[in-house]
Structures are given as C-alpha cells and as structure tokens.
C-alpha cells in the first residue's frame, strides 16, 4: 500500500497537508509557494480540497457551469455568530439565519485544467504528489446551484455563503452517478495521484429520506427505507460505486472516515478525523488502511489562547502538543495499515495567504518531522533549538508564520 506513493527515506509514506481552496480561493502562485515550503520540510502530499458548498474550483469541460456558476458566491459570512459553548452559535444543518453578518462582496475563482496540470508537474519536480478532492455526496450546494437537476427535487439554490453543514446533497441514482463518473474521469485525466479523494463527510440523509426515488433505491438494495441507519448503507453503496469506477482508472478511493459508517465500501483508504468516533481503530480492525488526520492536526484552530490570536474556528493544539502526536497511538498492533498523517488547513476563517502562513507554521514543521523521522525525531527541546534556522528558510520564500514559543 505504501508503495502507491514514490518511495523515499521517510518513516511514513504519506506526509501531507490539506489546503481548502473552496471556502477561500488560493491563487496558483501561493499554492506554488506552499509547495516550495513543503519541499524544504520533506512533506510529500498536497491534498487539494477543490469543491464544497461555498465554491467549486475545478474546471469541468463536461459540466462547465460548475465553475461559471458554482465558482462564485455573492458574499461571505464574517466573524462568528457565537462560540461552541453558546446557544447563540448556529448548529442548524442549514446555517443561514438572522444571526449571521456578511461582507457583501462576491468571492470567486477556479483553476483551469491546464493550470492544474502545470501545478501537478511543478509539485512532481519537488517530490510532491497532489491528491485532488471532489467532495461527494454531501457538501454539494455549489454544484446544485449550477445544476439543480443534481438534487432529487430540482430546486434552484444559490452557492453557499455561510459555513457549516448544508442539507442539500447529491442525488445518488444513475443521474448522480453519471455526473460523478464524468467529474472523476476528468480529475483522473488531470492528476496523476494514485489516490483520488471523494470526501464523503458530513452528508445529511434528510433529503434522501424524503425522496421517493431514494426510498425506492433503498428498497432495491434490500434495505429498510424507514430506517435512518440504512441510509448510511445507501451512502456506502454510492461510495462503492465510486471506488469501482476509480479502480477502472487505476486509482484508489480515499475518503473522510464517514465512508465506513455504513460498512466498508470496497477498496479504499480512510482519512481518520473524527476522534470521538475512534475512526482509526474502527478502520484498522476492518483491515482498511488509514491516514491520520485528527483534530490535533486541524490548523484552522488557534495555536495559543483564543483571545490572543487572530480569528479562528476555536482553540487548537500548541506546537508542543502537535510535536507530541503519535500516528500509531491506538493502532500500534497494525502499523502497516497507518500510511501516515496529514495537517488540515480548512479556510473558512483563513481569508488570506498571510493568515494561512500564520496558522500553518511552525506547526507544519512539527508534522513534517513526525512524518519523516517518526519515533526517531529529536526531543522537543532540541527541535525548538533548531527552529529559528528553519523558519528563516521559510521566510526567504515569503512564508511568515506564527512567532516561535519563548
């Protein structure tokens, strides 16, 4: 399994960072700058989160309105309506409500296939594989804004302007499957990664449960349309169809850990993020390879006291806590199934690249050392002593991160 990526001297084969370009678009030049920084640190995978409710960034020749319509939103939520401990914070599936404030400014952008091919070649020259993600069957609001027929009801929605989880998802009958095969086929033509990420996270089943078409599908699969759990199995069936298609293109399906909630969907790799559901342990017990991506490695979270830091989604791990992370924790008996680890740069609260560098570094240096040196990495005090020189190398590239601990 590890052999799917080019072999090097790293302790773990997969040493990655995920960049969310859907919520806030990142210009190509800045993506190249990130690749330059990754190369310095021996990080070897850039996972591009190309689509979400708030924007579609991958050019499709077959479905052009995905970018001409789905690539732009009318405005963007600013600040936060509250915090996780407050009843004022919006936990609804459909997050737009009177509490939200917006900037009133359109936000748009997408990458052409030609630009992405050039980016793939640039990354390859630095020993980095770009793993593309097209999120499905949830997080499809931008796609449905472009093509209402991708939903069961045909309702015309706008591209999402707030964060959170939207209830509008993809139809998963033959019409939806054909759309996904078209898009994933184009993705495979552009990217040479052995893995293609299909998301699979945070997919509400409300529309499926209300749809006569989906209810019929559930019955045809021998499942109970009145059982909420069986709609997880409908998602598993959908995911297995995508895995089978990707296999015909010589690729392996990668997805967030929700893809195994209804059972293993064929040949796949799980990206384990929901620590509260113990996805890594569940996956390896089922014999499924994993990439560790826990909330400790969510760098859209603050790396110091929230009140002293720029706007972030919430409190997060310090540099020392990140450096102490062990990808084998809880799965030591199946180390061969742990491909590696990945830091997540979700961009809801990261609107600029200067903010991106501030949130990512120096924590990303710690992730890089965990991945490359594993258990043989130096003690934390020695790591800290060597950071100033490494930070200067990054600053020479134009990457200025968070101040180092004193």
Image (cartoon, rainbow, N blue to C red):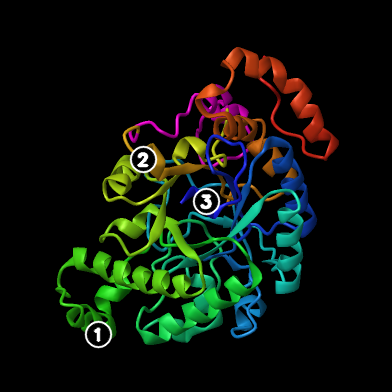
Q: Is residue 188 above or below residue 148?
A: above
Q: Position of residue 224 (x, y in %)?
A: 14, 73
Task: Specify the farthest residue to the right.
Answer: 396
Q: Position of residue 241 (x, y in %)?
A: 37, 74
Q: Residue 281's image quarter?
A: top left
Asked if the residue under mark 1 is in contact with the one under mark 3, i.e. CB atoms within 8 Å, the reply is no
Dot 2 alpha-carbon crowd within 10 angstroms: few under 14, some 14 to 19, many 20 or more: some
Choose mark 3 or mark 1, whichever is in front: 3
Mark 2 lies on residue: 275
User: SS of the residue at dot 2?
Assistant: helix
Residue 404 or residue 8, whichever sits in front: 8
Mark 2–mark 1 Cα distance, whole angstroms, equals 35 Å
- At x 63%, y 58%, the residue is 21
User: SS of the residue at dot 3?
Assistant: helix
Q: Is residue 51 left or right of residue 275?
A: right
Mark 3 lies on residue: 3
Dot 1 alpha-carbon crowd within 10 angstroms: few under 14, some 14 to 19, many 20 or more: few
Q: Residue 26's image quarter?
A: bottom right
The disc, 3 or 1, on the residue closer to the chain's N-terminal end is: 3
* Region of the chain picked out in magenta, as a range: 304-331
The disc, 2 or 1, on the residue closer to the chain's N-terminal end is: 1
Mark 3–mark 1 Cα distance, whole angstroms, equals 44 Å
């Amino acid at each position: 399994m590890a052999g799917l990526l080019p072999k090097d001297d790293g302790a773990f084969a997969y040493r990655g960072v995920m960049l969310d370009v859907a919520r806030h678009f990142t210009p190509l030049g800045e993506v190249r700058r990130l690749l330059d920084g990754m190369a310095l640190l021996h990080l070897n995978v850039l996972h591009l989160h190309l689509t979400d409710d708030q924007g579609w960034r991958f050019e499709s020749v077959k479905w052009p309105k995905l970018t001409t319509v789905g690539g732009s939103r009318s405005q963007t939520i600013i600040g936060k309506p509250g915090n996780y401990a407050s009843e004022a914070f919006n936990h609804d599936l459909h997050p737009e409500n009177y509490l939200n404030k917006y900037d009133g400014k359109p936000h748009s952008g997408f990458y052409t296939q030609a630009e992405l091919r050039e980016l793939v070649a640039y990354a390859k020259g630095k020993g980095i594989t770009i793993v593309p993600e097209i999120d499905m069957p949830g997080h499809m609001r931008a796609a449905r804004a472009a093509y209402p027929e991708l939903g069961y009801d045909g309702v015309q929605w706008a591209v999402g302007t707030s964060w959170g989880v939207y209830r509008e998802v993809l139809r998963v009958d033959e019409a939806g499957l054909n759309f996904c095969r078209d898009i994933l086929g184009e993705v495979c033509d552009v990217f040479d990664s052995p893995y293609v990420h299909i998301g699979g996270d945070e997919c509400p089943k409300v529309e499926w449960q209300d749809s006569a078409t989906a209810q019929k599908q559930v019955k045809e699969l021998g499942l109970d349309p009145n059982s909420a759990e069986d709609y997880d199995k409908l998602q598993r069936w959908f995911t297995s169809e995508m895995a089978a298609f990707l296999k015909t293109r010589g690729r392996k399906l990668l997805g967030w850990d929700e893809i195994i909630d209804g059972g293993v969907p064929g040949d796949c790799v799980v990206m384990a993020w929901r620590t509260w559901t113990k996805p890594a342990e569940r996956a390896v017990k089922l014999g499924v390879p994993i990439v560790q991506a826990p909330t400790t490695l969510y760098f859209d979270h603050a790396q110091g006291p929230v009140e002293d830091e720029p706007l972030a989604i919430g409190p997060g791990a310090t540099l020392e806590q990140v450096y102490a992370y062990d990808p084998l924790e809880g799965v030591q008996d199946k180390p061969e199934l742990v491909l590696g680890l990945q830091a997540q740069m979700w961009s809801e609260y990261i609107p600029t690249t200067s903010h991106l560098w501030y949130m990512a570094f120096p924590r990303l240096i710690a992730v890089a050392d965990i991945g490359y040196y594993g258990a043989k990495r130096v003690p934390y005090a020695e790591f800290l002593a060597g950071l100033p020189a490494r930070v200067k190398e990054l600053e020479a590239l134009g990457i200025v991160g968070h101040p180092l601990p004193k």
